[in-house]
Image (cartoon, rainbow, N blue to C red):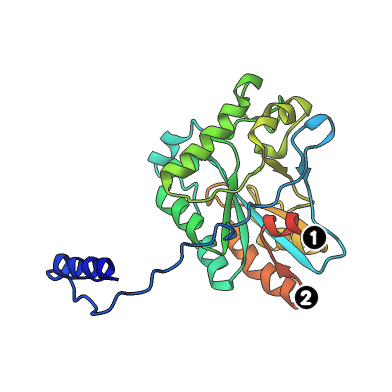
Amino acid sequence: MITLVRRVTAACVLGAALTACAATPQPVRPAPSATTTAPSAPPTLAPGPGGLTPVFKNGSRTHGRTVALTFDADMTADQGARAAAGEHFDNPGLIAALRALKVRATVFMTGRWAEQYPDQARSLGRDPLFEVANHSYSHYAFTGDCYGLPTVSGDRMRADVERAYAAFRRAGVPDARPYFRFPGGCYDRRALKALTPVGVTAVQWDVVSGDAFATDAEAVTRQVLEGVRPGSVVVMHCTRSAAPTTERVVREVVPELRERGFRFVKVSELIGS
């Protein structure tokens, strides 16, 4: 008891310049339990046949009327000069519309886009409405003959995906998802094998919005509304220069789908269900 009093007195004298010291010893708080549950990892699919990267196209058709709107933030590695000349590969109006409508969504972002628009990348990555996933660093195709895109060689595919994650971290995206969308949606067995060590789930879609290079917002809206089913993944774009109608489409599609009883979810929620 004497030892305890001496220790308390010494502590009071030492801390007097900073704060008042209680006259009686304070109870020692127990250390946090070692069994405290850590945040769960994002859901992924088990590897496909032969251990290949798994591919996800849509969620359950029977677990409720859910739909995932996904937006590709495209920018290829060689488009820096075009951005410097004033071309807009971002779409702040679209993101503002999603926020105003309170739509949960997944943005598949290229690393080059994150480098060009780091503030926007960070804002998306820290907004609980959204999740950021990987769309490669370069937006080069992972197969030949893919919509005229340049191609990345087989021995560089893994490095290209990992480089995108590094770009997200530099931009301040705290928790990019372990999901990958192939540029152009083009992949083959070689590409799936190359990405196996990265541990991602490849995410495709079952509804093509048709917003890329479209000028008729009503036609895109009809295509989305006609295609959506429970568990659908809709592919759209988050680039003003290549998809100028997308904001208008979202403002029309979202209220209509809600009227039909659909609930908007992120890809992670579809995979997890």
Is 191 rendered above or below residue 65? Answer: above
Exactly how many numbered labels are in the figure?
2
Is 116 rendered above or below residue 23? Answer: above
Q: Is residue 170 left or right of residue 176?
A: left
Q: Residue at x 62, y 27 (%)?
A: 157
Which disc, if any, is residue 231? 1
Which amino acid, mark 2? Gly
Q: Quadrant of the C terminus?
A: bottom right
Q: Position of residue 236 (x, y in %)?
A: 66, 53
The residue furthest bottom is 23
Q: Position of residue 169 (x, y in %)?
A: 46, 43
Q: Visible in this render: residue 11?
A: yes
Q: Is residue 116 left or right of residue 152?
A: left
**Disc 2, SS:** loop
Q: Residue at x 77, y 39 (%)?
A: 54
Q: Residue at x 40, y 45 (%)?
A: 86
Rendered image quadrant of residue 260: bottom right
Residue 13 or 17: which is nearer the viewer? 13
Which amino acid, mark 1? Gly
